Image (cartoon, rainbow, N blue to C red):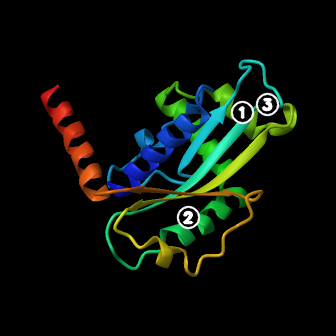
Amino acid sequence: MAGDFGEILTALFQAAREHPTELLDAKKWRLKQDRTMPAPKSDVVQLVLPHWPQPSSEDRLLCSEVKTKSTRGTSTPIADAIRDSRKDSDGRLIKTLEWLKERALDTGFTTVTIDMLDRFIDAIDYPQASREFSAVAVLCSTVDLASELSDVELPSPAERAVIILTLSDLKWYYESVFDIALTSVVDG
């Protein structure tokens, strides 16, 4: 639940940050093949296509690796998000786009179309677009941020953004959200 919540929060944060630009999101958390396992590959993939259906050099692809830490423990979410975000830029993103395309063919989801995905998969056939990578850590405010950052070598901003979102009572929030969602499905 914590990981899914962190990914959903990241998607909403990025959409709000981009406002009023429309952000197209495949909502990967809805495409999980097993509810107890994370969706494979890159965590959050969002498209900015300001002139769609006409591809343009203003098109952008946002890819974020998200790590969530809601309790004290030995995990290192900031360092792990940076490390795994590098996997995205080193090739995992294209595999994610191909996976999303397969899921679109299988499920017919329409938040992102096959043509939109192909715009980035077959990038050589279109005007050059930008790809922006982010390492996101979603932390409970009780986590000591200074110690989380103490051994972390931050990448240059040109390489990738590092985003740290903190929430008080993070565990309570994600458990409450999922309880409400479950209740609404059962009652609905």
- What's the residue at 32%, 54% (across, down)? 1
Q: Earlier in the sequence, mark 3 or mark 2?
A: 3
Report the front residue among 92 and 49: 49
Amino acid type, callout 3: Glu
The reply to whether dot 3 and dot 2 touch (C-beta < 8 Å) is no
Is 71 left, or right, of 109 in this rendering? left
- Residue 101 location (% of width, % of height): 60, 36
- Helix, strand or loop for disc 2: helix
Q: Is residue 73 left or right of residue 52?
A: left
Which numbered marker is on residue 81? 2
Residue at far left of view: 187
Question: If you read the primary sequence from the N terminus, does the residue marked by circle 2 or circle 1 appear first?
Answer: 2
Q: Residue at x 28, y 58 (%)?
A: 171
Asked if residue 17 can be seen in this view, the reply is yes
Q: Earlier in the sequence, mark 3 or mark 1?
A: 3
Horizontal side of residue 57 vs 89, given as left or right: right
> Residue at 47% of width from left, 30% of height from top?
107
* Residue occupied by mark 3: 58
In three-dimensional space, the C-alpha distance between marks 3 and 2, rounded to whole angstroms, equals: 27 Å
Q: Nearer the viewer, mark 2 or mark 1?
A: 2
Viewer-nearest residue: 172 or 85: 172
Quick check: 146 above or below 42?
below
Cβ–Cβ under 8 Å for marks 2 and 1:
no
The type of residue carrying mark 2 is Ala
**Mark 1 surroundings within 10 Å by alpha-carbon count, few (fewer than 14), some (14 through 19), many (20 or more):** some
Residue annotated with mark 1: 118
* Mark 1: amino acid: Asp
